[in-house]
Image: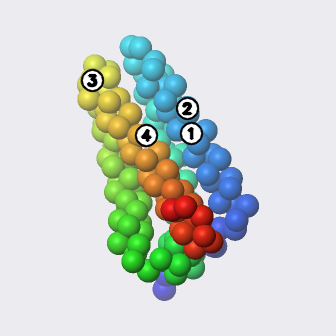
């Protein structure tokens, strides 16, 4: 028997997206802390835990009715782009999980500063590019479907 979580609502998704934005802002602020110390490490772990709890819920909402189903319905030849973005969900999640695990197991603050912080910065950039790509695909589909330029 598999237990399933309740399906998130549109309001819940808006909260997830808003919270993700705030957490990524907090993460950026923490990455600017120099030099990292035990307090910074604790806060990094707390923010990463929240993001790791949040992302599956946000992705689950996006999957309701099929990930970017409207885009695929209006532009079937775009399904490869949609599939690539959908696969990115798992990659984003597991790369963040790996970074959280590195921070939690690493005792050297120099290692966190030199190795993990740049990787977290790249993760933030990848997550933002992902969201921008999703939004651009939706806008382009709308423009193409309804006669705009796309």
Q: Please say if the residues under marks 1 and 3 sit with CB atoms less than 8 Å apart.
A: no
Q: Quadrant of residue 37?
A: top left
The residue where tag 1 is placed is: 23
Q: Residue furthest bottom?
A: 1
In this rendering, position of residue 57 left or right of residue 101: right
Front label number (4 vs 2): 4
Q: Residue at x 54, y 46 (%)?
A: 50
Earlier in the chain: of badge 1 and badge 3, it is 1
Image: 142 above or below 113: below
Judged from the image, the secondary structure of the residue bearing numbered disc 2 is helix
Q: Residue at x 38, y 53 (%)?
A: 92
Residue 4 appears in the figure: no
Q: Which residue is mark 2?
A: 26
Of mark 3 and mark 2, the one earlier in the sequence is 2
Quarter holding residue 35: top left
Relative image position of residue 89 (x, y in whole percent) = 41, 60
Q: How is the image coloured?
A: rainbow
Q: CA distance from mark 4 to mark 3?
A: 17 Å
Mark 1 residue crowding within 10 angstroms, few (<14) / some (14–19) / many (20+): some
Q: CA distance from mark 4 to mark 2?
A: 11 Å
Q: Which mark is residue 33?
A: none
User: Which residue, given by chain and number where applicable, does mark 3 sit on?
Assistant: 114
């Amino acid at each position: 028997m598999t237990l399933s979580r309740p399906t998130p609502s549109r309001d819940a998704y808006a909260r997830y997206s808003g919270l993700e934005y705030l957490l990524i802002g907090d993460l950026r602020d923490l990455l600017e802390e120099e030099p990292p110390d035990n307090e910074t490490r604790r806060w990094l772990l707390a923010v990463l835990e929240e993001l790791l709890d949040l992302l599956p819920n946000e992705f689950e909402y996006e999957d309701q009715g099929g990930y970017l189903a409207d885009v695929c319905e209006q532009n079937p030849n775009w399904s490869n782009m949609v599939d690539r973005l959908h696969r990115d969900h798992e990659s984003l999640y597991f790369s963040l999980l790996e970074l959280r695990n590195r921070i939690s197991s690493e005792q050297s603050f120099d290692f966190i500063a030199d190795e993990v912080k740049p990787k977290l910065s790249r993760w933030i950039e990848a997550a933002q590019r992902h969201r921008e790509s999703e939004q651009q695909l939706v806008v382009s589909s709308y423009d193409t479907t309804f006669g705009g330029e796309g």
